[in-house]
Image (spheres, rainbow, N blue to C red):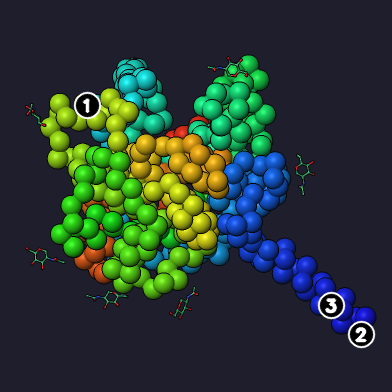
Amino acid sequence: MLPFVLTALCAHLATAQTDPYANWPSYADLPLNASFPPKAAWGVWGNDDVHGALNHITNDTRKKSAEEIQTGQAFNLNLELSFFPQPANIERKPLVHLFQPGDGYTDDVITFNTQMSTQIDGLRHFAYSIDGNTSTYRYYNDLIPDYEHVIGHDYTSVLGIQQAADKGIVARGILLDYKAWMDSQNKTYDALSGWSVPASDLEKVAEWQGLPSNWSRPGDILVVRFGWIEAFGKLNETERAIIVRGPGEWVGMKADDESAEWLWNKKLAMVGADNPAFESTPFGHVIGGHDGMSLHQLLISGWGQSIVEFLDLEKLAPALHALNRSSFFMTIQPVNKIGGIASPPNAMAVI
Ligand SMILES: *[C@@H]1O[C@H](CO)[C@@H](O)[C@H](O)[C@H]1NC(C)=O
Ligand SMILES: *[C@@H]1O[C@H](CO)[C@@H](O)[C@H](O)[C@H]1NC(C)=O
Ligand SMILES: *[C@@H]1O[C@H](CO)[C@@H](O)[C@H](O)[C@H]1NC(C)=O
Ligand SMILES: *[C@@H]1O[C@H](CO)[C@@H](O)[C@H](O)[C@H]1NC(C)=O
Ligand SMILES: *[C@@H]1O[C@H](CO)[C@@H](O)[C@H](O)[C@H]1NC(C)=O
Ligand SMILES: *[C@@H]1O[C@H](CO)[C@@H](O)[C@H](O)[C@H]1NC(C)=O
Ligand SMILES: *[C@@H]1O[C@H](CO)[C@@H](O)[C@H](O)[C@H]1NC(C)=O
């Protein structure tokens, strides 16, 4: 009997080590410790983990995502770096592009706020805070003791964008085209208002696209086309300048427990959208029984899950529709900058 028990026990331990989902907490189980912020997933990947949701990407998920390459057609998902007349939000400094001529060669120097165009928000970009005061900021896995460690004299590089740059972000992307779904029903909405899209509607979009109910796989990157870029593209220059000056309002995912639970269950490596923040404005909703919460706080600081914003899906979406497809091969390569907060994602899709 004893050898059998030992063998079974060893097999169980081996499974527990190799299958990260064997004891995967449900959304209701979060946070694992009452001292952690609302619905944080601190400790789920280990107390010292710095990769968060990127842990869903493995050698196997990368290999499997290559099956998405069928026609070989590639799509740049990044807007031009100066697509906006200035970075969204007047507080942010404009991009500076200088040319530096040499003898027989030319360099250039680009200085820009990483929130300028298409961007991936890293884990130092957003913190839980109960009152907006930097003294109450809390970052993923509590790895940054205070704000001085992000920008000040106690600067450390933990949770910097270099960790995402090193990880190897190769995944299956899933596009949910909310705008096309609304169009298909002759339903209109203002993408430049705080139009909130609940998870139940995104599920209907998936169904409309012909996806099965179990359409997501761990390690997927969910990309939603909310129609913001299309709406912005229809504005004249004066109107664009007003939108970009901010703070403004925009369409996006509704920030509530229904959305959060839906996203948590999907085990996504990352989420992205063609809008300024994935979620809608204004920020500040009830999540996990706490008011003043945003998906930014929950995903970035709670789950270590980056958000990709202002993705250019305007060519990819029609190409996928024409093929009656929703999934694609996707890579994201942030700049390898120690201590970096965000980065152009250098995002690419191959279908
Ligand atoms: C919960 O956090 C507290 C305070 O950090 C700590 O003393 C306690 O050991 C933790 N409990 C568990 C189960 O991790
Ligand atoms: C991925 O494959 C490499 C090369 O075989 C290996 O060193 C690494 O441990 C693998 N990673 C995981 C998470 O299995
Ligand atoms: C933030 O909190 C600190 C510590 O409690 C306090 O000294 C400071 O005045 C606060 N700052 C603001 C802008 O409220
Ligand atoms: C949308 O409008 C078009 C043109 O008026 C019409 O042919 C179509 O049936 C409408 N679709 C729905 C779902 O109402
Ligand atoms: C599109 O694909 C879905 C699921 O793969 C399928 O059910 C549907 O019939 C397809 N539609 C067309 C027009 O081929
Ligand atoms: C999803 O469901 C279908 C049946 O609808 C099944 O054949 C398939 O194996 C399921 N996929 C996964 C990943 O569970
Ligand atoms: C831009 O559109 C607004 C209406 O929203 C209009 O008042 C304005 O004259 C337009 N500007 C130009 C330069 O066309």
Q: Which residue is mark 3?
A: 7
Toward the bottom, the furthest residue is: 1
Q: Residue at x 29, y 50 (%)?
A: 226
Q: Which residue is mark 1?
A: 242
Q: Residue at x 28, y 56 (%)?
A: 178
In the rendered image, the quadrant that contains the C terminus is bottom left
Asked if marks 3 and 1 touch (Cβ < 8 Å), the reply is no
The percent coordinates of residue 55 (x first, y second) are: 59, 53
| Separation of marks 3 and 1 at Cα, in angstroms | 67 Å
Q: Which residue is mark 2?
A: 1
Circle 3 crowding by C-alpha within 10 Å: few under 14, some 14–19, many from 20: few
Along the line of sight, the residue nearer the viewer: 298 or 291: 291
Q: Is residue 128 visible?
A: yes
Q: Secondary structure at mark 2?
A: loop
Query: Considering only order in the chain, which callout, 3 or 2, is on the residue closer to the N terminus?
Result: 2
Question: What amino acid does circle 3 point to?
Answer: Thr
Along the line of sight, the residue nearer the viewer: 197 or 55: 197
The percent coordinates of residue 320 (x first, y second) are: 27, 62
